[in-house]
């Protein structure tokens, strides 16, 4: 019911002209850059969202938008610059997102995790749900607690427990060791590109697919660490440095050009950490994006760029209202992690 009310209000704002009025005001009396943060590129709502954005905003590659934004050059196009970013590099960014980009002729930027592109393994944050959904064992003990898997509540609790262990792991090695133990305990193997091919669009992109996307001119890429640890939770500063620097070097080797963009995993302040911010600055990147939900102004730190959430389940009318600040308070609070 709440979603229907929000959609009704958004439709009223849009069709009475209020959205257009606020957008007109922002275009003429404010200077900002909007960066949207998507992950998946599937669902029936993405196409109408992109159609709306193409009509009312100047959709750009992230690097082009930032280079322009941090200069004082005058741009004849008064539309607000907007960037579409997709984190992690899911296969559906290729099978669905790239197709839409070519059809609509709008660019987007993908932040890749080279370790996953090389291995083809299931992303760690999807592992808990997959393992529990596919296991046939009756019970499992994790951290001294036994979960009875015939009980839906305990299955749900087990997913949360697995995710917490993976998310807060102090090193990538410990995270992967725990993930291996869970696969053995639950008698389930996680999917990968080698066994599933392109049947599972939640698996990572391959280098061949990445190169095809970039060669088209509609997709650009940035780094998202080597293995997607939460930088603020790693205990070894040297491992943080490797995750940040090696991901850039691997991408540059695979793509054949310099990589200047970085996205922090998870991306809120507590996930970045002081060492993460410092090491990104010293690694040779020019810009880095967070998941802090705001628009960017000329005063925004180029290593702490804000992004608004891109929601593929959201109706385009609600998105239109949110982007100009209408309905924003309710929606932003709902989306905060």
Image: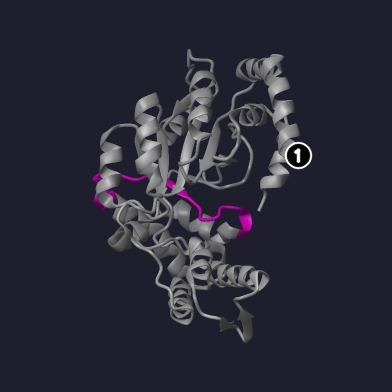
259 is within the stretch colored magenta = yes
Q: Residue at x 65, y 74 (%)?
A: 151
Question: Does residue 333 appear to the left or right of 290 in the view shown?
Answer: right
In the rendered image, residue 335, in percent from the top left (x then y), is placed at: 66, 46
In the rendered image, residue 146, in percent from the top left (x then y), is placed at: 62, 84
Which residue is under mark 1?
2
Question: Does residue 6 appear to the left or right of 40 in the view shown?
Answer: right
Element at badge 1?
helix
- Check the image and report above or below for 165 versus 4: below
> Which of the 4 image quadrants contains residue 329?
top right
Question: Does residue 334 appear to the left or right of 160 in the view shown?
Answer: right
Viewer-nearest residue: 184 or 119: 184
Q: Residue at x 62, y 15 (%)?
A: 28
Q: What stretch is highlighted in magenta?
A: 252-270
Q: Residues within 10 Å of mark 1 (few under 14, many from 20)?
A: few
Q: Which residue is drawn at 40% across and 25% down?
A: 104
For the N terminus, give its image quadrant.
top right
The total of numbered circles placed on residues is: 1
Report the residue that reaches farthest toward the bottom.
144
Viewer-nearest residue: 334 or 141: 141
125 is within the stretch colored magenta = no
> Which of the 4 image quadrants contains residue 172?
bottom left
Q: Which residue is drawn at 60% across and 76% down?
A: 149
Q: Is residue 105 visible?
A: no
Q: How is the image coloured?
A: one colour
């Amino acid at each position: 019911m709440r979603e229907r009310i929000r959609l009704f209000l958004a439709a009223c704002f849009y069709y009475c002209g209020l959205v257009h009025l606020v957008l007109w005001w922002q275009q003429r009396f404010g200077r900002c850059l909007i960066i949207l943060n998507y992950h998946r590129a599937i669902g029936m709502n993405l196409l109408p969202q992109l159609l709306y954005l193409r009509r009312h905003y100047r959709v750009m590659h992230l690097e082009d938008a930032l280079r322009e934004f941090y200069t004082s050059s005058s741009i004849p196009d008064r539309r607000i610059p907007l960037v579409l970013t997709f984190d992690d590099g899911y296969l559906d960014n290729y099978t669905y997102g790239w197709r839409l980009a070519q059809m609509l002729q709008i660019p987007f930027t993908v932040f890749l995790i080279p370790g996953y592109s090389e291995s083809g393994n299931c992303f760690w944050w999807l592992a808990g749900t997959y393992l529990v959904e596919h296991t046939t064992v009756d019970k499992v003990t994790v951290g001294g607690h036994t979960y009875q898997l015939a009980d839906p509540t305990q299955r749900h609790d087990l997913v949360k427990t697995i995710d917490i262990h993976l998310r807060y792991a102090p090193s990538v090695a410990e995270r992967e060791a725990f993930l291996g133990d869970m696969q053995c305990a639950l008698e389930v193997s996680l999917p990968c590109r080698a066994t599933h091919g392109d049947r599972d669009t939640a698996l990572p992109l391959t280098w061949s697919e990445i190169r095809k996307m970039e060669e088209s001119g509609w997709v650009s890429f940035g780094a998202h660490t080597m293995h997607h640890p939460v930088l603020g939770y790693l205990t070894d500063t040297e491992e943080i440095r490797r995750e940040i620097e090696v991901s850039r070097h691997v991408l540059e080797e695979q793509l054949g050009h310099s990589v200047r963009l970085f996205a922090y995993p998870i991306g809120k302040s507590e996930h970045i950490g002081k060492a993460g911010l410092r090491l990104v600055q010293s690694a040779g990147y020019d810009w880095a994006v967070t998941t802090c939900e705001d628009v960017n102004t000329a005063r925004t730190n180029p290593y702490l760029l804000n992004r608004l959430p891109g929601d593929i389940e959201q109706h385009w009318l609600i998105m239109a209202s949110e982007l100009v600040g209408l309905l924003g308070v309710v929606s932003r609070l709902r989306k905060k992690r």
